[in-house]
Amino acid sequence: MALQLRALTLLGLLGMGASLRPRKADFFRSEKELNHLAVDEASGVVYVGAVNALYQLDAKLQLEQQVSTGPALDNKKCTPPIEPSQCQEAEMTDNVNQLLLLDPPRKRLVECGSLFKGICALRSLSNISERLFYEDSSGEKSFVASNDEGVATVGLVSSTGPGGDRVLFVGKGNGPYDNGMIVSTRLLDRTDGREAFEAYTDHATYKAGYLSTNTQQFVAAFEDGPYVFFVFNQQDKHPARNRTLLARMCRQDPNYYSYLEMDLQCQDPDPKAAAFGTCLAASVAAPGSGRVLYAVFSRDARSPGGPGAGLCLFPLDEVHDKMEANRNTCYTSTRDAARDIFYKPFHGEIECGGHSPVRASVCPRRARASGVHDIHAGTRNTAVSMAGLPAMWALLWGCVGGLVCLREGKDLARLGAQGSSQNFLCGSEHLPYPLGSRDGLTATAVLQRGGLNLTAVTVTTENNHTVAFLGTSDGRILKALEGPSVHKAPALTSLLSRTQVYLASNGTSSEYDSVLVEINKRVKHDLVLSGDLAILYAMTQDKVFRFPVQECLSYLTCTQCRDSQDPYCGWSPGGSGHSCLWDTGGCTRKAECPRAEEASHWLWSRSKSCVAITSAQPQNMSRRAQGEVQLTVSPLPALNEEDELLCLFGDSPPHPARVEGNTVICNSPNSIPVTPPGQGEAPSKPPSQPFTVTPAHGALRTRALTSAGPWVQTGHRHALWPLGGQA
């Protein structure tokens, strides 16, 4: 995947200034191991799923509610409800939280545990101790999550479409005592005689072809427009290898006709190193022109290149295009070629290839199912039942007039179709069964780590710049910035110990600090931003941490603000005040400066600029002479008619200045202060030595003649000072 004009720079989460005070993060500590984390964007309430417990915390991680969910009498082999007389192997068993999801429109929380074959409950968002639905006697139809603690379950709460039913899309691996369901769609309300957590329809599940130890480990679920996506790893047995797969299906497709999956690969920029083979975490964001899947992958120590991790980017536009191309290729490639590319997910065989594109736009499903005429090579054959046709034949039938169907040959070309993938995105007319393709997308890592893993990722945008927060296996959070670059190839970044090293494509580098969350404690998968995107919540084994995404106000000078390289921060010469002019200055977010859109009123930290006097004319002036001093200021903030620029030299009274271009013209001061000890370039020169302009202790000031117009001054001071003596 081409990543032109993009760069990735690795930063420390809490800034770079070594002289800044240490920061103490807010955290909540649990006596139980933590499993999952969710945040209500509207209320700010934090929900935490743990072993045998659920926690409801406020936005500052203060405990509001705590609920016990285990242990309970259970055994993985037994079907709930557990009766000791019928399940003699039952014993007190921990309940590991497998799924924790919010349904804000219905003000409820979905939680599923490992107890009782993975059944789920609905709870009130305002009070988790209030259980809205729970049923443990419905049998297999209510088994949702994996009952194996080592098998991940992912889910997504959504609807089947505008005004449709609220449903839960679930992906999970197949543990040794699971029910074999890999992907399923579950109701969240009682509908047509079905209880909550039953399958949406009889066909809204996919089971593994045979029961065995799990071959899938699910990583993430997300939605994009009308589609639901799953990211998961699959351990193939023949040949033995791990594959990372991205699956897509339509939300409005209760029969899963639209299910497609394909490989994702994350390559190391070093061609001698092996690819990063296993996806550990994934997140989706919209950095600008389209949404992008950000996924972190790992590589084990046995692979060429050694242990490590990489971050790869997959634009969803490219994902959709590739999946549609795969659907059409299933029709048009040769059978021999298709046999190496396509397969039927989870079980069974599939036939693709050797056919022309077909448009099935006018052939009703019911007509084809009841019997149709086959026209081939100019002959009319006897009516046949679709139920008796091989699967691929059913896939390839088109229709004319709703009654007579066509199979491969010249008659199909006569339809002038471009392929039915564009006309039938979700229905059985194009794919009446799931399709898998080994021909997927490959990306090159834009960031890599050697020696340990990246374990979590979440992505947001700030001022049209994409910021990715990354958790690590040694207890750190890193912040990566993706932005425009003058280089065609993406810049690469690595981290060594406590030092972040940015390696640009031209070979230059610069170093930044990194910040510990909790030393040698793995940052868990759920890395979540608050609704206003101002707070980041991270989780280790027994703690939840709360970090501000930026601490711009802690940088007290423009130099500190600039050197932080924090993409959230910029130096506002007007500080955080209303005027946003040359104030005492302040390091702020752009949104906090009302005049930030005006030229040079907010200087982004990564632009590496501060307001400075770059030259002065004349260079020398007699103490007794009165005249004008021309100061070149760069960058000079734009001034409007209501702004007045004033000059201030030391303790001299301020006086108005003129602005011509980027030049500020001041009258020379009436009185010259005594040169401070150690200042000046030639203190031993005779008293008649003229004066010069040097950066020292004065300040250039402005006043905004508005209702909010206080006296303000720059953070970079320049003045007229004598070189020594008296004239």
Image: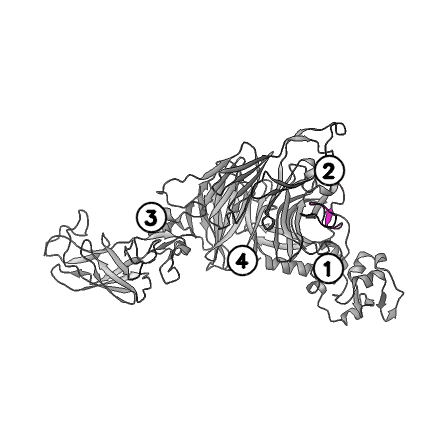
Nearest to the observer: residue 425 or residue 444: 425
Residue 530 position in % (x across, y down): 50, 48
Q: Label 1 is placed on what type of residue? A: Gly
Q: Cα distance, mark 2 to mark 4? A: 52 Å
Q: Which residues are magenta?
A: 194-212
Q: Which residue is mark 2?
A: 137
Q: Secondary structure at mark 3?
A: loop
Q: Secondary structure at mark 4?
A: loop
Q: Which residue is mark 3?
A: 556
Nearest to the observer: residue 548 or residue 331: 548
Task: For marks 2 and 1, give the one nearer the viewer.
Answer: 2
Q: Which mark is residue 427?
A: 1
Tag 1 or tag 3, which sits nearer the N-term?
1
Q: Cα distance, mark 2 to mark 1? A: 35 Å
Do the residues under discs 4 and 1 have CB atoms within 8 angstroms?
A: no
Q: Label 3 is placed on what type of residue? A: Leu
Regarding residue 434, the answer to whether it shows in the image is no
Task: For marks 2 and 4, give the one nearer the viewer.
Answer: 2
Q: Which residue is mark 4?
A: 3
Q: Is residue 324 left or right of residue 407?
A: left
10 Å crowding of disc 1: few (<14), some (14-19), many (20+):
many
Residue 438 position in % (x across, y down): 68, 53
* Quadrant, the C terminus: bottom left
10 Å crowding of disc 3: few (<14), some (14-19), many (20+):
some
Verify whether residue 199 appears in magenta: yes
Q: Label 2 is placed on what type of residue? A: Ser
Q: Is residue 546 left or right of residue 294?
A: left
Q: Cα distance, mark 3 to mark 1? A: 60 Å
